Amino acid sequence: MGSEHAPRCACLLLFLAIPLLTAGCGPEGPYPAREIRLVVHASPGGISDAVSRHVSRGLQERLGVPVVAENRVGAAGSLALSFVARSQADGYTIGYAPVDMTIIPHLGYSRVSLGDFEYLTLHTRAPAALAVPASTGWTSVDDFIAAGRERQINMGTSGSGSIWHLAGLALSRAIDVPLTYVPFSGSGQAVTALLGGHVHAVVAAPFEVDAHVRAGVLRVLAVMADERSPLLPDVPTFSSLGYPDLTIDAWGGFLAPRGLAPDRRERLLQALTDVLASDEFARFARERGLEVEVRKGEAFEQFVQQESERFGHLVAQAGLGLAGAR
């Protein structure tokens, strides 16, 4: 090739190389370059929504782009999870990971698989609490058991197959007392029914009954945790009362569609870790009786699998779900 062609060839090679040199950043530049959507399975006003919005603000500060919590309510949480699983794995759609995701597949309500996601981090846990009206005179779990062996006890829960419904089933088995379950669309409605005398007890999170306990209207007999709730420091745990296996809590975390690029995953995970380790989040959690527990990546995924196995046994024992559900 003659020397007169060298400049032309060099320009051609440079032109061809430009797309390869810029492919890592993409047309938008370094990640993140635009708004990130955080999809939440729960209605506005609940604890999952409150955590999501609090964390969204923290992520926005650390990532430098808007992070918007978007509620997609329905089908026991599977609507939001399905949306996240089907979204492009580009880091611009992430989701709230509720404990319900380990229950839904066993009920047969959704085809979403636990393998459809990249697990980012667990953030908090809240134990189940057994609450009754103070007017009943029941001051201990033994009183509750004695009453249940003499009469029918109607137990309010936040819906058939919910985490609190399963906690109630586990309670019934542990204390060997049959309970009649009355499902409601949420814990708020179940607590309202308890206050109105329409049910005899509820299983709910401590923060969902705390205000009524402080007002002297409700009493919590015990919590399903290894340690006492900071909101209810005078209330014993079921473990301390001789029921070591009765530890059930609602937990939450964050996830993304499977296939997220490692560099984007790490960018999100670092920002989430910084938010969850902040004094501001610790104060937010403490005020709501939530226990901050961070499990990242593979540790979070293993935890989810273990919870799925545990709740799968409870669902099968209770005969819940649709025919053919795993």
Image (spheres, rainbow, N blue to C red):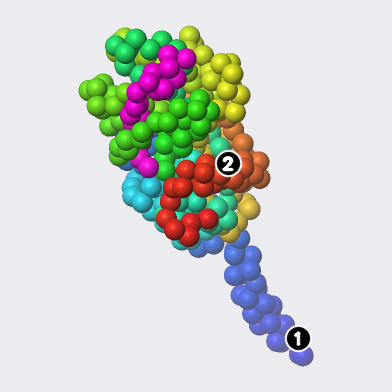
Disc 1 is placed on an element classified as helix
Query: Foreground: 177 or 313?
Result: 177
Image quadrant occupied by the N terminus: bottom right
Q: Residues within 10 Å of mark 2 (few under 14, many from 20)?
A: few
Instruction: Decide which of 163, 299 is in the foreground and name it.
Output: 163
| Residue where numbered disc 1 is placed | 3
Q: Is residue 7 magenta?
A: no
Q: Is residue 209 above or below residue 44?
A: above
- 2 vs 1, front mark: 2
Instruction: Kindly identify which residue carries mark 2.
Output: 310
Q: Position of residue 16 (x, y in %)?
A: 63, 76
160 to 26, vertically: above or below: above
Between the C-alphas of marks 2 and 1, the distance is 74 Å
Q: Is residue 61 above or below residue 6?
A: above
Q: Amino acid at mark 1?
A: Ser
Residue 160 seen by the camera: yes
> In the rendered structure, which amino acid carries the disc numbered 2?
Arg
Residue at x-position 47% and y-position 30%:
172
Q: Position of residue 285 (x, y in %)?
A: 47, 24
- In the rendered image, residue 176, in percent from the top left (x then y), is placed at 50, 28
List x then y, in percent, for residue 280: 48, 23
Q: Residue at x 56, y 44 (%)?
A: 313
